[in-house]
Image (cartoon, rainbow, N blue to C red):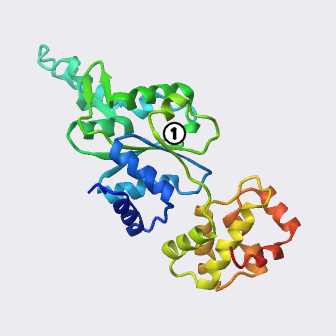
Amino acid sequence: MTPRTLADVDAAFAAQDYIADRSLLVAVHLALEMGRPLFLEGEAGVGKTEVAKTLASILGEELIRLQCYEGLDVAQALYEWDYARQMLAIRLIEARNDGGTHQVADIMSRDYLVARPLLQAIERGALGEQSVLLIDELDRADEEFEAYLLEVLSDFQVSIPEVGTIRASVPPVVIITSNRTREVHDALKRRCIYHWIDYPDYDRELAILRAKVPDVSERLAAQLAATMQRLRSLDLFKPPGVAETLDWAAALTVLGGRELSRQLIDDTLGVVLKYQEDIEHLRNLGLDRLLDADSG
């Protein structure tokens, strides 16, 4: 059921163990009430994709995910013909030799289409069913695809020459994410409720750790939250996100760690930092400095 008030959104996210700040909750609330796509930008690993997953769970609707990448075209995002089935159908028609009772044109029907994420969401809407459509990492796609997406989001309908026009009477809840590897056009952003998700502060990161990794000790959780604040203040090529915080907590728990030590940090740096240059830079600075991060 759709949360109707800001307090409802807050409670629903908390029930899903997503620790959100007020600004994000307001953005989600406005997007739901105004029927507008929610455009989330931020560094990788700060919880943008998780917002869509959480919303799908809250609403009790299917999550349909379109993962963007360089070279993504309309066919891969909307639909493709099932050529293997079409060829088989043609051979069966030829084998029957029944004077045309089964027309080759039949293979250009909806039955021979493979629906990709955009069409899946629109078809569900055409049946009166809502979904949560996640368009993930739009900044990785080409500008041509972005222009097409703007057209789809304008009216939530697509025209397939051989089939006809399909329109969603119930539009999907749309979440668009971007890591800002390039700027997304203003025309698309204007159609959305925009929100930047930043790295969490110490208190929120500690709350996230307690919610997501309940087995971690209080001492270790506090140390990890403070250490991540310290790491993000360093001159790293790729500062760690919340995803790395949770991975680190899980890894340390597997190793039986109850509190951070220089040895534990050194053993598990590859869980937190994903570039050798960052690992070497931190080791050159001295790992002991991270052990001073006992509080926010």
83 or 4: nearer the viewer: 4
Is residue 243 toward the left or the right of residue 236 in the image? left
Q: Quadrant of residue 239?
A: bottom right
Q: Residue at x 31, y 22 (%)?
A: 159
Q: Quadrant of the N terminus?
A: bottom left
Residue 74 spot, x, y in % from top left: 44, 28
Where, by quadrant of the figure, is residue 278 drawn?
bottom right
Describe residue 290's horizontal placement relative to residue 225 as left or right: right
Looking at the image, which is closer to me, 184 or 116? 184
Q: Where 157 falls versus 242 (above or below)? A: above
Which one is nearer the viewer's eye here, 94 or 273? 273
- Name the residue rendered at 52%, 82% in the picture: 215
Q: Position of residue 121 (x, y in %)?
A: 32, 40
- The number of callouts visible is 1
Residue 94 lies left or right of residue 264; in this view the side is: left
Q: Residue furthest right?
A: 284
What residue sits right under mark 1 in the picture? 68
Q: Residue at image x 14%, y 14%?
A: 100
- Decide: is 103 above or below 57: above
Disc 1 marks a residue whose amino acid type is Cys
User: Badge 1: few (under 14), some or many (20 or more) residues near its Cα, within 10 Å?
Assistant: many
Query: Can you give x and y, in whole percent of width and height, for residue 65 in the image?
Result: 42, 46
Q: Residue at x 37, y 66 (%)?
A: 11
Q: Secondary structure at mark 1?
A: loop
User: Quick one: quadrant of the C terminus?
Assistant: bottom right
- Give how far across and how far down residue 2 sits, in percent: 29, 54
